[in-house]
Amino acid sequence: MNLRIKIQIQSIRTSTTTMILALSSSCLRLSVINASKPFSSTITATRTMTSYQAWRVTQQDDGSFKGSEQTLDTDDLPHKDDSNGVLIRVSHSSLNYKDALSASGNKGVTRKFPHTPGIDAVGTTVQDNTPVLITGYNLGMNTDGGYGEYIRVPPGWIATQPFAQPRVAMIYGTAGLTAGLCVQKLLQMGADPSQGPVAVTGATGAVGSVAVELLSKLGFDVVAISGKAGAQKDALLHLGAKQVVGRDALDTTKKPMLKPLFANAVDTVGGSPLAELLKQIQPGGSVACCGLVAGMGLETTVLPFILRGVNLLGVDSVEIPLAQKQAVWEKLAGEWACPKTEASAVDIGRHQLDDYLKAFLKGESSGKKIVLDHSLTEGATSDAKSNL
């Protein structure tokens, strides 16, 4: 939307040359005139304002939080006064647990409302139409995120978009990036298929499911551990798991050490299951840890570490240097691509966000990769599945 502001100046007489300054918020025009006789002059300042649609969460009078589609203006986006702020036209985003928490008003994720969630975004820069990809840092948490058609972020947050289609980048999103980082850490520690099976906890989750397919693709025998092992067994076997077991495989025991069943592992749940998993890792093996859905606490002993030399590897996908993210994105767009995961993705529009985010909080997503497509409006259809 272009806003044109006209300023009419008439019948001004002075004995000296006059400088007339016309200022708008985005355009400055200076005119030098001879004002020795009456004059009439029109100065037009033109400012470009782009309105856009966003799914925005607001706090209601009763203290609850509600998300709805709203019309906003790019002038209101953060980093407006930062000369390095980059305005990006967003084509797709993804759905994550953090987004669901933000949408529910969780102040541990988002401090101030109204707010636009979306911790992932893919699109093009407004300035030169460069394809870009943004995940993590503060996007969608306390900086308006990918559930709006535009975002403005610092250049240090922006990765080059390496996928053939932007939608595919958001099939992976933060969850896929995290899975890739976990696998990369295991490989850096010397993990090899010849060493034995690799366990993946929370295997039906967004991170776990990508880890199952990726590890299987790399030749590992994957043991998928899940609380939904019964209902999702076939899906996990389809992703490449060699064995699917329930979460009771990691029930709490009083024994400080157990039979070493796994050469390595990716843990996405934390808490007591992680403590039990550490007891079952073979000597010299590693566990890449990235989640806390089962709890932040970790009650364990030093025995797995000092008797078997087990390595507990923390994985952060949010604040790590951009170059590390870029390296994993390049792999996921190439030799680490997970076609089964890509084929199962669900595409939705902004008008469907509320239902899908609530399903996330209820644990009903079953690891499906849900992609927000800003081009899908109410009544539009998608070639992808549209059900949970």
Image: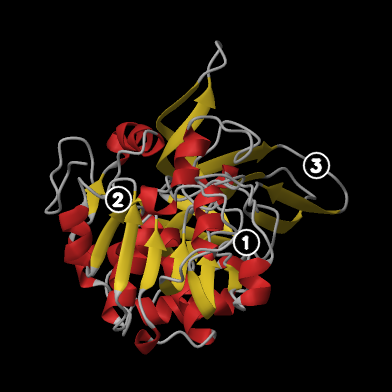
| Residue at 41%, 81% in the rendered image | 330
Q: Which mark is residue 13?
A: 3
Residue 1 seen anywhere in this rendered image of the structure: no
Specify whether 148 is left or right of 16. Answer: left
Q: In what element is the residue under mark 2? A: strand
Work out whether mark 3 precedes mark 2 in sequence or the reverse, and give the earlier one.
Answer: 3
**How many other residues sit within 10 Å of disc 2, few (<14), some (14-19) or many (≥20)?**
many
- Horizontal and vertical percent for residue 223? 32, 66
Q: In this figure, which residue is indicated by the disc labeled 1? A: 85
Tell which of 138 and 15 is nearer to you.
Answer: 138
Query: Label 3 amino acid?
Result: Arg
Query: Label 1 amino acid?
Result: Gly
Q: Which mark is residue 370?
A: 2
Query: Label 2 amino acid?
Result: Ile
- Horizontal and vertical percent for residue 388? 22, 41
Q: Is residue 159 above or below residue 5?
A: below
Tell which of 8 and 355 is nearer to you.
Answer: 355
The reply to whether discs 1 and 2 touch (Cβ–Cβ < 8 Å) is no
